[in-house]
Amino acid sequence: MKQLLKNFIIFFAIFIVLAGFFYSFSEDARNVERVGIQRLVEEINGEAVKSISVEGSILKITLNDDSEQTVKKEAGESLSELLKNFEVAQDKIAKIDIEVKEESGLQFWLTTLLPFLLPLLLIGVFIYFMFRQVQGANGKAMMFGQSQAREFNSQEQDKKKKVTFKDVAGVKEAKEELSELVEFLTSPKKFLELGARIPKGALLIGGPGTGKTLLAKAVAGEANVPFFHISGSEFVEMFVGVGASRVRDLFKRAKKSSPCIVFIDEIDAVGRQRGSGMGGSHDEREQTLNQILVEMDGFEPTTNVIVIAATNRPDVLDPALLRPGRFDRRVVLDNPDLQDRIDILKVHAKKKPLAKEVQLRRIAERTPGFSGADLANLLNEAAILAARRNKRMIEMSELFESIEKVMLGPERKNRIISDKEKKITAYHEAGHALVAHVLPLVDPVQKISIISRGLAGGYMLKVPTEDKHMHSRAELVEDISVMLGGYITEQEIFGDITTGATSDLNKATELAHSMITAYGMSKNLGPRTFGKKDDMIFMGRQLHEQRDYSEKLAERIDEEMMDYINKAAEVAREIIKNHRERLEGIVKVLMEKETIEKEEFDKLMEELDNKLGDEQKTADVASNEVNTKTD
């Protein structure tokens, strides 16, 4: 209805413009007075008319003073008959120069036929556009079941835009695994001669941002074949059968472009286990999955079409999708280690001007657990920050600040806090840092700040010196002590607690719960896990947990958790009490500078250790002298 109204307004505007154009065309451009026949007769009788020009039904009058007038007469009546009917004397007419001009062809068409043809023409154009829109709607309806996959032809792409394995840093094992697919696509004959079957598909498994899509594009770029990219969510629609139709169309297009690669991103959107959803066993998603299974089985042995799919939830995929003959290869992409992070930073830093003092290794050391996308975002944020500061080079300060921005969020320097809250925050963060410094298995402190960033009022960063894939029970217990360091410090210093420790308490509780229920680190409950996670998700959260233990065991799990948390809290409390002078030294610097970097923190701890060590020696000497005199 809105489109119809819009078209009507457009055509109405066109009609007005054309009418005005023809009206202005038919009228004289000069300002000519238009009079009636009676006035013309009076002017002729008064001998005021110099000449008359007859053009069809229009009389152009020129008076003795050279002024002009126009008179409209009947079309079928001549000028002589007109003047005779008004009884104008012949001697008066004889004094006037009368000229009869033939009407031009253009003017004839404009004045005679156009008033009839123009409305019909506009109505015809209006009907034409209406039918065209209806046909477009029908065409879209017919195309509704066609695949929405985007095709990237590697042969037609510019070499600068083509993605190859050189553009994918890290993931060495994954690239080696997928390089075999490239060989299958480029030279399948040597494999077929030996009776080898071309893999139907490869499943890329990894967390968000680990480079699954980039790696699939690199395979297509290396093989120099077309690349079809579609998301799993694009198959499913509200209409039944559309998803299956799109799957058929996608594989039909792929077979025509063979050899090629079909990349299905987030395949878990349609590949979940059948019969486990809330929509019954024959919903639209499952029909789409069935069609994918049929199509992947329907390839001929000589059809060079390889399906690459990506997911970060392999546990929810249907077993029929994972069996050999469909997805023959499973390639796992982990978060990059130290050397991989250095390589990834080098790739993303190619087009960014870095200062000479920038050391990408130091950035990589500070970013354990970062994915490739996180590292790319880090360098982008650093470039934006350098531009805002009107710099021509990206320096280490921008890179370090970008790490914290990616991890915690932007600084909130304009947030106004009272001196009391600032002091509480300083003691809280100093408590975390002190406990982390004293405990031997905790990662070293990298930075302490009481400047609000993101949702955090302050923060203490600790980064491992090397990549870790396994953690011992002792390490996790000490981590809980560090998490509770701020909470215990508030208790010891102020005799009260605040809401600032909410996040720390949540993390400590979750870690203690995982130690008991998932890691089997309970001392009394034995080597087993407790509870099974359900696959059903509601509003982004786990719907419920399947409990495979009794209420009695649930109480013991709570007791074990409290035991871990209480012991970790006691360790933190002893450290705060025994190292009160060090705590005050950290707080003093924080209140002055608001931020302490790793080098400054290590130097501060060393100075405090030496100072307190000398004072302790002096106290011991004085005590010995007193004891000697007493003896």
Image: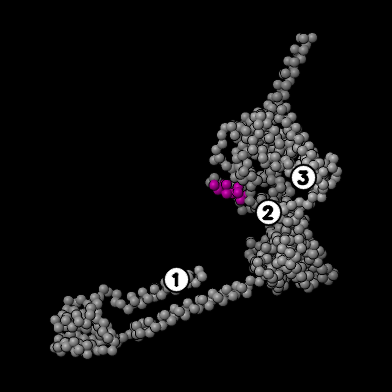
Quadrant (top left/top right/bottom left/bottom right) for the C terminus: top right
Note whether 531 is above or below 574 in the view shown. Answer: below
State the image quarter where residue 271 is shown: bottom right
Q: Position of residue 302 (x, y in %)?
A: 78, 73
Q: Secondary structure at mark 3?
A: helix
Q: Which amino acid type is marked by label 1?
A: Ile
Mark identifier at residue 514: 3
Residue found at the very far front of the displayed protein: 551
Q: Residue at x 64, y 35 (%)?
A: 498
Identify the secondary structure beneath mark 2: loop
Q: How far apart in space, not on screen, are marks 3 and 2 (Cα)?
A: 20 Å
The residue wearing badge 2 is 540
Please tell me which residue is depicted at 17% across the width and 81% down the height of the picture.
Answer: 43
Identify residue type, mark 3. Answer: Ser
In the displayed structure image, the side of residue 112 where residue 167 appears, left or right: right
Q: Are marks 3 and 2 in contact (CB under 8 Å)?
A: no
Examine the rendering and report whether any part of residue 522 can be seen.
yes
Range drawn in magenta? 379-388
